[in-house]
Amino acid sequence: MRLLLLPLLFASFLYSQNGILNVSWPILNIEHQKPSVPYPLILTNSIKNTKLPVYIPSSYVYDKQMIVVSDENFYTISFFIKNATIMIAGDRTFQETISNSDMELQRLLKTSSLEFIQEEGIMNIDFNRHGVNYTLSIECNNPREDKRCTEENFLYKIYNKLIIVGGKK
């Protein structure tokens, strides 16, 4: 794991208990909470018990072919586009605790820039919002030649259009 990703993974560990990260729910504008057209049942039924803000790309919110896997503490949603798969995942669990007094960790927590990672033909962005760890990724059928998997621009545009579509406080 790259050194710059550590702040994203550890930032919310400092304020957690029992392996579950505490969520700082964003204040949402009521007008933006209710969609003008109901979301597909595959989405709403799958995330109704998920206890974290559920983000997905606004461009794909009405895709009835999405695949949703969720639990109360995590979710993964996949969208199939031409010759590629886009996935967004949120997770509020962790495996171990860390010390708040670690000076190296405190230095790393101050780093907050987005980092794109390209590994094994998949382009990823890992980020933390509201105390929850999220990953947005794209996997291409031809990862060496498909610019969506070799350049940051495509995934960055999707990242900028993430919206909250549910989650349970």
Image (tube, rainbow, N blue to C red):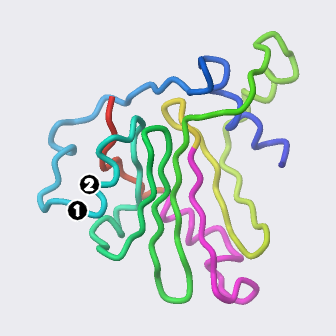
Give above or below for 93 relative to 159. above
Residue 44 shows which numbered tag?
A: 2
Q: Tag on residue 41?
A: 1
Q: Residue at x 83, y 49 (%)?
A: 1
Magenta stretch: residue 57 in it? Answer: no
Whether residue 31 is situated above or below residue 82 in the rendered picture? above
Quadrant (top left/top right/bottom left/bottom right) for the C terminus: top left
Residue at screen point 26% across, 54% down: 44
Q: Is residue 3 left or right of residue 140?
A: right
The residue at the far top in this view is: 101
Specify whether 162 is left or right of 49: right
> Residue 20 at x, y = what percent?
56, 27
Q: Quadrant of residue 162?
A: bottom left
Q: Where is residue 36 shown, x and y percent of the image? A: 12, 58
Say what amino acid the circle numbered 2 marks: Thr
Asked where in the image residue 131 lies, by quadrant, the reply is top right
Residue 151 or 8: which is nearer the viewer? Answer: 8
Q: Is residue 80 above or below residue 69?
A: below
Label 2 crowd (10 A; few <14 / some 14-19 / many >=20):
some
User: In front here: 59 or 98?
Assistant: 98
Q: Secondary structure at mark 2?
A: helix
Residue at left 47%, top 68%?
A: 78
Nearer to the camera, 14 or 5: 14
Q: Residue at x 60, y 64 (%)?
A: 137
First to last magenta residue range: 134-159
Q: Are marks 2 and 1 in contact (CB under 8 Å)?
A: yes
- Residue 151 in percent (x, y) is at 68, 74
Q: Amino acid at mark 1?
A: Leu
| Horizontal and vertical percent position of residue 72 | 43, 39
Q: Residues within 10 Å of mark 1 (few under 14, many from 20)?
A: few
143 falls in the magenta region? yes
Real-space Cα distance between discs 2 and 1? 5 Å
